[in-house]
Amino acid sequence: MLSVLRNRAYRHLFTAQVVALVGTGLATVALSLLAYDLAGADASAVLGTALAIKMVAYVTIAPLAGAIAGRIPRRALMAGMDLTRAGVALTLPFVTQVWEVYLLIFLLQAASAAFTPTFQATIPDLLPAEHDYTQALSMSRLAYDLESLFSPALAALLLTVVPYNWLFAGTTAGFLASAALVVSAVLPKPAPVERTGGAYARAAFGSRLFWATPRLRALLALDLAVAAAGAIVFVNTVVVVREHFHRPAGAVSLALGAYGAGSMLAALLLPRLLARTGDRPVMLTAAFALPAVLAAVTAITAAGPGAWAWAALLAAWALIGAGSSAVLTPGGRLIRRSSADGDLPAAFAAQFSLSHGCWLLTYPLAGWLAAGAGLPVTAVVLGAVALAAAAGAAALWPARDPDTLGHLHTDLPPGHPHLTDARPATKGGWQHVHHYVIDQHHHSWPRPAAGH
């Protein structure tokens, strides 16, 4: 898997991603302590609102970023977003009001919503071979999982020698280092984008691409299944551990670590598994496994807090991590198959926005249900959402899903450059076969009668 690091440009971008993730992890810990200083017992409400603001920024800003990504050099855009995030992190220690936290969090996450899809769209250009790109996706998944384990430990170590405000300095340093690494990477020139319409049309194109492509509609349903299962981990772990099992605070980290360990193991195994079986069997199998695990979580949380139940919970969290990783990691491969090279920024921006819209739905659902109806009911409801989403993905994603499709053009004049290899159709128009994606010449998916 490490062979892809021989590519200098990818190595610099991957390192930039890692140091930025560590900086973000430090900021998460410091922000929690800042919220407690400002709001005391209401700190949970402050953090919950900040999390909602983060998701709103992701959902609204990412499509706009995808629209302008083709007009601004990617290296300049990513470095600019890193510098923006560094500036915001540098000001966080000086805030004295809760509303200032909300404003700065929105700016910080808006910059992340522009950086991340642009980063994701650049990797296929650097690693055009399918095998290399799959390895890069797994490494990116590993980076996220390792950050979730490493950053809290690093923050705990630093807090033994410095006040928490100094953690924001570490965040700033991480973003500055990321910007320097991005600038040092030599990136290929992205493919030109041929698309009519203004800024709104460009921003909406990524979402239209998802709705018009069957496998991408399925990917969105799979994102909902992951969000349903993941929400119970990220929202309810502390309640499960402290209130149900009466475990100490350190056990919360152990439970989250089990989730991360499962995710990392799946990411390590995926490149070989995908090479043998393909995307659809792996992703759908993992998606259907998630509601089954949530059914087990229902039984675990309904039972007493015995030793077997605690071990079962850790195993369930690890399985949710593995299933989520098996669904999310190959998602980049689907987007790459379904987009023209020049449209990759818009496609990744749309996926970033739409997938976080799923989390915006499941996060409050997990919180409200746990508070009002209890943990077993929460697991049942989220399991039902995950099952419906997995079933929807299976229905939306054709079992036979070739890249090359025959189709008919009735809206292009004779002699158009796109019709170079086309032949006249018996009922009018032009018929040809090629790798099919939604773009300016293909506005909808071919029907089965179109000859594929």
Image (tube, grey):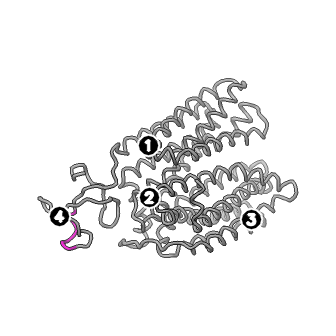
Query: How many circles with numbers are drawn on the protein?
Result: 4
Earlier along the polypeptide chain: callout 1 or callout 2? 1
Secondary structure at badge 2 equals: helix
Residue 323 in the magenta stretch? The answer is no
Q: Left or right? Give the position of 440 relative to 377.
A: left
Q: Position of residue 23 (x, y in %)?
A: 71, 61
Q: Which residue is disc 4 drawn over? A: 423
Instruction: Say which label, 3 or 1, has the lower sequence index.
Output: 3
Circle 3/circle 1 CB separation < 8 Å: no
Mark 1: few/some/many CA within 10 Å (<14, 14-19, 20+): few
Are the two marked residues, 1 and 2, in contact with CB atoms closer than 8 angstroms? no
At label 3, counting other C-alpha atoms closer than 10 Å, the crowd grade (few under 14, some 14-19, many 20 or more) is many
Indicate the amino acid at tag 4: Arg
Q: CA distance from mark 4 to mark 3?
A: 63 Å
Q: Secondary structure at mark 3?
A: helix
Please state which of residues 56 and 446 is positioned toward the viewer in this rendering: 446
Q: Which residue is mark 3?
A: 92
By secondary structure, the bulk of the magenta-drawn segment is best described as: loop
- Residue drawn at (47%, 42%) of the image: 282
Q: Which mark is residue 369?
A: none
C-beta proximity under 8 Å, tags 1 and 4: no
In the displayed structure, would residue 303 be above or below residue 441?
above
Q: Return the residue found at the far right.
A: 161
User: Gap in Å between the C-alphas at discs 2 and 4?
Assistant: 28 Å
| Labels 1, 4: front one | 1
Instruction: Assess whether mark 3 and mark 2 are in contact (beta carbons under 8 angstroms).
Output: no
What amino acid is at disc 2? Arg
Spot the residue most to the left.
Answer: 426
Query: As rendered, which of 217 and 370 lies closer to the eye?
Result: 217
Amino acid bearing label 3 = Leu
Q: What's drawn in magenta, residue-wise?
A: 409-415
Where residue 336 is drawn, which disc sits there?
2
